[in-house]
């Protein structure tokens, strides 16, 4: 496990340097982002080797469930996207079906997340499970802060280069 962490630490700077030009997000970009999230999560939870061996298979299964629910949600909204794209009015029945599907999927996501956290009893400590619950919000906030800092530094650079 230590070798895996060392490999992550060494590979991440290399991946950042060897990034292709910015364009549309493709699967490799998503994979790199998932790898970074797993690395940050491992660091945040301070997992031991035994904990990591038990946690990550469960975590991957949970991520796959969430991805399937997201895909199902996208598929359920396709009729609405198509209608809006063609500037058509959306019927009451189509909207109600979409709302019911959205409600069902969101409730399923919540139930799955709660069941996942509960299933980790015995694998992770209570503190680690609490950190796991907070981790997505913390990562999102850090990403937003980094974007703001980047924009500020870019704006300062543009003002400095005007003359």
Image: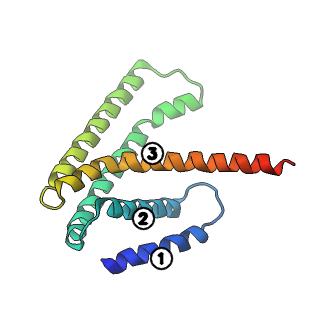
Up the image or down, 98 lies above or below 150; here it is above
Q: Position of residue 151 (x, y in %)?
A: 64, 46
Mark 1–mark 3 Cα distance, whole angstroms, equals: 25 Å
For marks 2 and 3, the one nearer the N-term is: 2
| Left or right: 121, with 82 as reference point | left
Residues at discs 2 and 3 in contact (Cβ within 8 Å): no
Residue that carries the numbered disc 3 in the rendered image? 141
- The crowding category of the residue bearing disc 2, from other C-alpha atoms within 10 Å (few below 14, some 14 to 19, many at least 20), is some
Residue located farthest toward the left when viewing the structure as drawn: 122
Q: Nearer the viewer, residue 52 or 141?
A: 141
Q: Which residue is drawn at 21% across and 67% down?
A: 51
For marks 2 and 1, the one nearer the N-term is: 1
Badge number at residue 10: 1
Asked which secondary structure carries label 1, the reply is helix
Mark 2–mark 1 Cα distance, whole angstroms, equals: 13 Å
- The crowding category of the residue bearing disc 1, from other C-alpha atoms within 10 Å (few below 14, some 14 to 19, many at least 20), is few
The part of the image, by quadrant, that contains residue 17 is bottom right
């Amino acid at each position: 496990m230590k070798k895996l962490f060392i490999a992550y630490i060494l590979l991440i700077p290399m991946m950042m340097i060897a990034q292709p030009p910015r364009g549309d997000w493709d699967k490799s970009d998503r994979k790199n982002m998932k790898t970074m999230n797993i690395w940050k999560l491992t660091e945040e939870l301070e997992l031991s080797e035994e904990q990591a061996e038990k946690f990550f298979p469960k975590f991957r299964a949970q991520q796959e469930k969430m991805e399937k629910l997201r895909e199902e949600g996208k598929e359920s909204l396709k009729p609405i996207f198509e209608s809006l794209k063609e500037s058509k009015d959306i019927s009451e029945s189509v909207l109600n079906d979409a709302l019911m599907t959205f409600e069902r999927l969101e409730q399923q996501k919540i139930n799955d997340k709660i069941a996942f956290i509960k299933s980790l009893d015995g694998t992770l400590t209570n503190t680690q499970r609490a950190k796991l619950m907070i981790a997505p919000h913390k990562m999102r906030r850090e990403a937003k802060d980094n974007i703001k800092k980047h924009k500020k530094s870019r704006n300062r650079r543009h003002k400095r280069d005007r003359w």
